[in-house]
Image (spheres, rainbow, N blue to C red):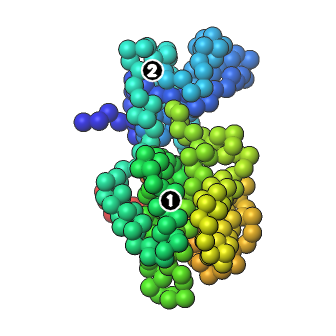
Amino acid sequence: MQKRGIKELNIGEDFTGFCIVRKKELKQKKNGELYLKLEIGDQSGRLNGKVWQEAREIYDGVKVGQMIKIMGTVQSYKNSREIHIHRLRAARRQELIRREELLPKSDRDIAKLKQLFMEHFHSIQQEYLSCLLRRIFKDEVVLDKYLSMPSGKLWHHNYLYGNLEHMVCLLDLAETMSDHYPAIKKDLLKTAVILRNLGNMLQFSTAGFIDYTTVGRLLGLPTLAFQKLKQEIDSISDFPAELKIQLVHLILSQESQVEKTASVLPMTIEAIVLNQLIQLDILTNAAQRIIRNDRLPDSNWTKYNNLLQRFIYVGQNAESK
């Protein structure tokens, strides 16, 4: 049985295990004494931790991105869980594990998701779009890396294979919308779903925890995807100009996760549909995570979510009905 991670522990439970330091901050109590506030993460997610003793010494000795072993107890603070860390040390060389093992990962059947993705991938019949996809993903290692990336840092699909999970959902939805609205160019829409996150491998770092790279922050996902897409399209000498501009529009009219704006407004039916489907899957995925992680103790509601600007109703426990 796999050991539960820090995010899965209940208030009052003890924890001894490995995690990654995501953030560190030296803070001051009301009496002037220092304490150390850490954000730590493992395969279950992230949690704040506090060290009350020898705060300065531990702060100086701990680095962001470092693998550490902690011993602590989960406590409640302002309707959230945090871990009171009793002991902390760097992981020893013989204890080091692969950092990927301490990253959250999709709980879906990855092999099944890959199968569904490839079925969509091979369903695209438009010759230039099919050629473009095969050209971009001719290297299976590159494709596997792309599929394994997260699709967000914190808000949605923020785990390994989040990109794969997100794309399969969008591709399924694109099929459904195309069935209802025959005017939609299905192959074009599905190609945009597959290519819209092309910049993820440059946008995100997964070295211990998921974070934006400098390039990712400065340029944003649509720009990174556009650069790669333009390079590949330009290498196909007879790629139709009209098809190129529509595909590029689909990429540039998607909202950046960092800036929360698009380079241009969606102005084709495919771009309008793509943006709505993206938001639908993002919000549903985020709501599912909030319900799982942020339910208030002895309540049918989650704590207030600032991004959604609302509470979310969880429903009654079976025992309380």
- Foreground residue, 176 or 251? 251
Q: Secondary structure at mark 2?
A: strand
- Foreground residue, 173 or 301? 173
Circle 2 residue: 69
Q: Quadrant of residue 112?
A: bottom left
| Residue type highlighted by circle 2 | Lys
Of marks 2 and 1, the one in the foreground = 1
Image location (x, y in percent) of residue 242: 66, 78
Seen at 45% across and 17% down, the residue is 91
Residue 20 located left or right of residue 37:
left
Image location (x, y in percent) of residue 229: 62, 60
Residue 164 located left or right of residue 132:
left
| Residue type highlighted by circle 1 | Arg
Seen at 51% across and 87% down, the residue is 181
Q: Is any atom of residue 30 visible in this view?
A: yes
Image location (x, y in percent) of residue 33: 70, 16
**Identity of the residue furthest to the left in this view:** 1
> Where is the C terminus found, in terms of image quarters?
bottom left
Label count reads 2
- Foreground residue, 169 or 236? 236
Compared with 171, 8 (above or below) is above
Residue 132 located left or right of residue 175:
right
Seen at 38% across and 14% down, the residue is 94
Circle 1 residue: 135
Mark 1 burial class by Cα count in 10 Å: few <14, some 14-19, many 20+: some
Q: Secondary structure at mark 1?
A: helix
Q: Is any atom of residue 299 visible in this view?
A: no
**Residues under numbered marks 2 and 1 in contact, where contact means CB atoms less than 8 Å apart:** no
**Comes first in the chain, label 2 or label 1:** 2
Give me the C-alpha separation between circle 2 and circle 1.
44 Å
